[in-house]
Amino acid sequence: MIDFKTFLEIKYLHQHRSLKCSQIAKQLGLDERTGDKWLNEKSFRPRESTPRESKLDAFKEDIVRMLESYPYTTALILPIKSLALLNIINNRDIGDKYSGIP
């Protein structure tokens, strides 16, 4: 997949420098098939990202509730890595370690 800048370079080199697809691909360090594909496209289409599930999605309600209930402790929660937060939520043993959080 290419970015928008590369797409514009392909179009420019073909239209204004009259380079062939193989020449464009060589100059930009692309596979010739990639250059050909994008040369025939009328407009740029960025790759659609695949939505991925987070390990914390199942605990979103708990996390939101904690942040809403104790907004001033957000600074304590945010630096915690995801897996550590997951362990905290699973164990519900955060009263001693992080005061003010249920």
Image: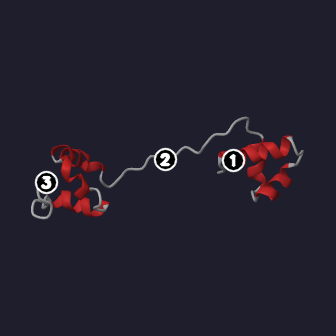
Looking at the picture, how far across and down is residue 78, in whole percent?
A: 28, 56
- The residue that label 3 is drawn on is 101
Query: What kind of residue is marked 3?
Result: Ile
Q: Name the side, left or right, on which 26 lies relative to 48.
A: right
Q: Nearer the viewer, residue 20 or 33?
A: 20
**Residue under the image location 73 percent in, 51 percent down:** 34
Mark 3 or mark 2, which has the lower sequence index?
Answer: 2
C-alpha span from label 3 to label 2: 34 Å
- The residue that label 2 is drawn on is 50
CA neighbours of label 3 inside 10 A, class few (<14), some (14 to 19), many (20+): some
Looking at the picture, how far across and down is residue 65, in whole percent?
A: 19, 44
Looking at the picture, how far across and down is residue 95, in whole percent?
A: 10, 59
CA neighbours of label 2 inside 10 A, class few (<14), some (14 to 19), many (20+): few
Q: Can you tell which mark lies on residue 5?
A: 1
Q: Name the side, left or right, on which 7 lies relative to 61.
A: right
Mark 2 or mark 1, which has the lower sequence index?
Answer: 1
C-alpha span from label 1 to label 3: 48 Å
Query: What kind of residue is marked 1?
Result: Lys
Query: What kind of residue is marked 2?
Result: Thr
Q: Nearer the viewer, mark 3 or mark 2?
A: 3
Q: Secondary structure at mark 2?
A: loop
Q: Are marks 3 and 2 in contact (CB under 8 Å)?
A: no
**Residue under the image location 86 percent in, 42 percent down:** 16
